[in-house]
Amino acid sequence: MSKPILKIESIATLDELALRELVFVQEQGVTIEEEHCDDESLFLHLNLYCDSELVACCRLSIQKDIAHIGRVAVRREYRKRGFGSIMMKHAHDYARMKGCTSVEISAQISAFDFYKKLGYVQFGDKYLDARILHIDMSLDL
């Protein structure tokens, strides 16, 4: 297996949209309308490839000095192998390079421990988004 390669795009690629549909729609039962509810051009898209296959992705937006990361997805067969952490490290590095001092994420409760291991802390109350329980988390960069 080759070293993962990060590609940063100004628009969502077909590979990214397909991976997000696989993870969020097919695996988690989010409707296609909920998955495609935002204007994708408002985000920067980070895609992590390994051996020419998209293995992880996320999107990022910046307001003032806070980066917002969302739609973090890792292909099922690559989970628990460090690719999610690599993806997040790249997102953090990019946010830091752009002058951000913190990152916020709306984390699915099932991924809470993953983000906690990366240094994120919870703020606010749990809430439902697309019928999935979430919690807001932040990380100081």
Image (cartoon, helix red, strand yellow):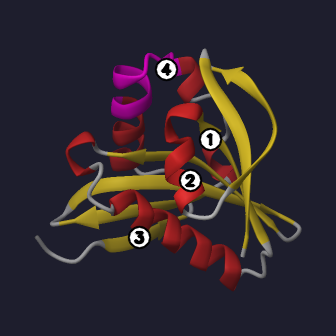
| Amino acid type, callout 2 | Tyr
Label 2 sits on a secondary structure element that is helix
Query: Mark 2 touching mark 1, by CB under 8 A?
Result: yes
2 or 4: tag closer to the N-terminus:
4
At label 3, counting other C-alpha atoms closer than 10 Å, the crowd grade (few under 14, some 14-19, many 20 or more) is few
| Amino acid type, callout 4 | Ile
Label 1 sits on a secondary structure element that is strand
**Along the line of sight, the residue nearer the viewer: 58 or 13:** 58
At label 2, counting other C-alpha atoms closer than 10 Å, the crowd grade (few under 14, some 14-19, many 20 or more) is many
Q: CA distance from mark 3 to mark 2?
A: 22 Å
| Amino acid type, callout 3 | Lys
Is there any visible trace of residue 108 in the rendered image?
Answer: yes
Residue picked out by circle 4: 32
Residue picked out by circle 3: 7
Instruction: Verify whether residue 27 appears in magenta.
Output: yes
Q: CA distance from mark 1 to mark 3?
A: 23 Å
